[in-house]
Each structure stands twice: as structure tokens, then as C-alpha cells.
Amino acid sequence: MALAIEHGSVTYRGKDQSTVQALADVTLEIPQGGLVVALGASGCGKTSLLNVMAGFQPLTGGRATFDGRPIEGPGRDRGVVFQKDTLYPWLNVRDNVAFGLRLQGWNSAARHARAAELLDLVELGDFATASPHQLSGGMRQRVGLARALATDPKVLLMDEPFGALDSLTRETMQELLVDVWERTRKTIFFITHAIEEALFLGTEIVVMSPRPGRIVRRYSLDFVQRFAQGEDAAAVRSDPAFIALREEIRTLIHDTGRRRHERPQLDRAA
């Protein structure tokens, strides 16, 4: 397994110095080449889980490893794509993509060639000299994806990268990501609160409970492989099995959230 969390917990201090438990006893393995999606309502600990994998947030209990070694901080073997793009406005698109390569000491010709290759991959080859402010939201996220791929990380960690996009652009970006995954065979961990997005993208979905975040159910899926192998995206999304699973997961998330909110009332009544 490329990336693993074993009985992971994260606890931190809230603004009023109260103790907040973001994750509780999470065990998750991300297989090499997989596209694993963590799905749950806002506040369920998805981002905390991703931050542990990225090395931004230490566990307060349990163990996090990458290729069998403890995760002790960020590393170039794990690329991160955030919900809000972090492009440098003073650099053009090509130089944004090549920024990490510049820090690694690549010469100008080599890093520009690598950036051109990746911009073609994300279908932005004609925008290499454009400024970030000239791009749409979806295009900026494509640049962010290309930049994350530039240093050839083993794993991509994606923190709701399409959450701020309109629905049509979001679907286009999902399809682009599947194409990139199919062509690069990168290991991807993707978090979202959108059920259809999770179903379309994931080789596996892990559904998380409200805080403290726990994995309440796992699903192994083949929708993404069907699209990658040439089936029309609209046909995949309208498949009765896709729709039935969407409703099953929606009910699961709603029921899990309702039980959490009802628990204090039951305790008081007792």
C-alpha cells in the first residue's frame, strides 16, 4: 500500500480552549494507482484526514505511513491540489506550472519543456503565456493540477478542488481528472461532499460520519473504469445502478447526521 492510516485520531483545541476531536479511529489504505474518494458532510474531518496524509497535520493517536515509512511532514512525493487555487499572479501559466521545478534546480529549457507537456495533458497548451487573471475558474484549477504533477509525485491529494465551480465546468473537470488518472496512473486521494462526484470518480468511496470523523461505510466501484474505457459520461451518470447508489449514500449520510444530533436529546431523556 502506498499510503496508510492506522487507527488515526486527531484532536485539537477550539477557539474557546475546548477539546475538539476531528477524527476518531480511522483506518484507511490507499492502494497504488487507486482513485479513492472520501465523502461526507462539511465538518466530518475529510480535510483533517487529507492534511495528515500531506504531512500538514500530525495525528494525536494512531499511525500514518507512506511506503511503510512514518509521515513526519510534507514531501515532494505527495502533491496537493486545494479547493482555492494558489497560483502566483505575477507569473504566467507556464511559470506557475514550472515553479516547483525551478526550486529543484531544473534549468529553464528543461522546466519549460516539462510545463508544456503537462499543459497539453490538461488541455491548456495554448495558454502557456497567459496570466492567471485571464483564466476561468476551471482553467485555473487545470493549471493547479498541472503544477501538482510537475514534480512527478507518487500521490495526488485533492481537497475539494472542484467545489467552487459551476455544475457544467465541474463535470468537465471530473472527466479531465479521470483522463489524467488513466494516462498517468497516479495514486489519488480526493475529498468531496458531492455524492455524484464521488460516484463518478472513485474506484473506492469511504463515507465519513459527522465529527468526530469515522469511516462508516466503504464502496468499491467500477463507474470510473467504465468512463475511462470509453463509455459516455452521461450514460454512466444515468445508469440505474449509479442513481440507486446515489440515493443509498444520501440516505446513509442523512441518517448518520440525524443520529448524531439526536444523541444528546436521548441522553438527556435517559
Image (spheres, grey):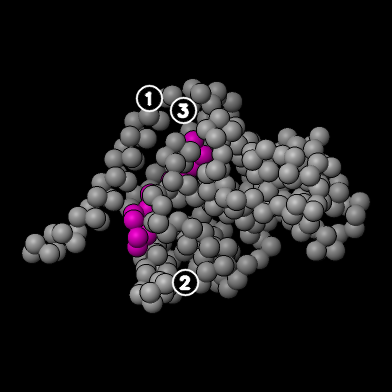
Identify whether 151 is placed above or below 146.
below
Label 2 – label 1 distance at C-alpha: 40 Å
Which residue position is annotated with label 3? 237
Determine if the magenta segment contains residue 207.
yes
Which residue position is annotated with label 2? 59
Amino acid under label 3?
Answer: Arg
Q: Residue 79 carries which label?
A: none
Residue beneath the point at 44% across and 46% down: 193
Residue beneath the point at 34% across and 62% down: 212
Identify whether 170 is placed above or below 99.
above
Observer-nearest of 83 and 74: 83
Q: Position of residue 117 (x, y in %)?
A: 80, 42
Q: Where is residue 270 in the image (x, y as percent from the top left)?
A: 8, 64
Packing grade of label 3 (10 A; few <14, some 14-19, many >=20) is some
Disc 3 is placed on an element classified as: helix
Amino acid under label 1?
Answer: Pro
Give the residues drawn in magenta, as a range.
200-213
